[in-house]
Image: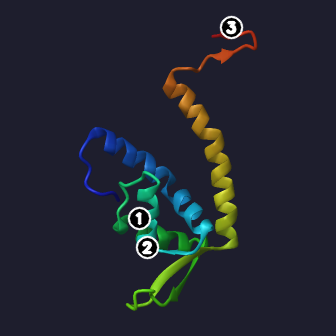
């Protein structure tokens, strides 16, 4: 799924990424239709450089079979073979919005636990166990 991993930290990042890669791809497609290598470039620019092209295509195929994305071919701007582009379907747009809502709820909760701040603060600054 990912490029060669060099550290335990990279392995952890890879595991975390597996859980959200489909949402990341849907979010990128929501910006504009894209073809395979553009996903790798956008993910790398976003700090998720662990993803390889070889892991993107099987996931895009699964998402297409599930009706979340649609594909079409368009000429390459470099004059090569036509490229396969992906765009969101209505179901993909709904899945993205649902996934974003789940992420907005989940990420801060996990962050609090990992930061060791699971106690609830009272308005006065006191904490309750």
In the rendered structure, find residue 125 and report the number of the disc placed on it: none
- Mark 3 surroundings: few (<14), some (14-19) or many (≥20) residues within 10 A: few
Spatial distance from mark 1 to mark 3, Cα to Cα? Answer: 46 Å
Establish if 55 lies above or below 65.
Answer: above
**Which SS class for mark 2?**
helix
- Residue 49 location in percent, x, y? 37, 55
Pointer 3 residue? 126
- Residue 116 location in percent, x, y? 51, 20
| Between discs 1 and 3, the one toward the N terminus | 1
- Mark 2 surroundings: few (<14), some (14-19) or many (≥20) residues within 10 A: some
> As rendered, which of 43 and 57 lies closer to the eye?
43
- Residue 8 location in percent, x, y? 28, 39
Quadrant location, the N terminus: bottom left
> Would you identify the image quadrant in which residue 52 lies?
bottom left
Spatial distance from mark 2 to mark 3, Cα to Cα? Answer: 51 Å
In the rendered structure, find residue 40 and report the number of the disc placed on it: 1
Quadrant location, the C terminus: top right
Pointer 2 residue? 36
- Tags 1 and 3 in contact by the CB under 8 Å rule? no
- Tags 2 and 3 in contact by the CB under 8 Å rule? no
Q: Residue at x 45, y 59 (%)?
A: 43
| Between discs 2 and 3, the one toward the N terminus | 2
Q: Residue at x 45, y 86 (%)?
A: 77
| Residue located farthest toward the front when viewing the structure as drawn | 78
């Amino acid at each position: 799924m990912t490029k060669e991993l060099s550290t335990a930290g990279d392995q952890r990042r890879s595991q975390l990424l597996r859980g959200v890669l489909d949402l990341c791809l849907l979010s990128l497609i929501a910006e504009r239709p894209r073809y395979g290598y553009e996903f790798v470039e956008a993910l790398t620019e976003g700090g998720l450089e662990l993803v390889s092209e070889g892991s993107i295509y099987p996931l895009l195929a699964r998402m297409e079979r599930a009706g979340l994305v649609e594909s079409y071919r368009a000429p390459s701007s470099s004059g090569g073979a036509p490229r396969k582009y992906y765009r969101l379907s209505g179901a993909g747009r709904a899945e993205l919005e649902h996934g974003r809502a789940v992420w907005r709820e989940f990420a801060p909760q996990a962050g609090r636990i990992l930061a060791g701040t699971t106690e609830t603060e009272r308005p006065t600054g006191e904490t309750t166990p």
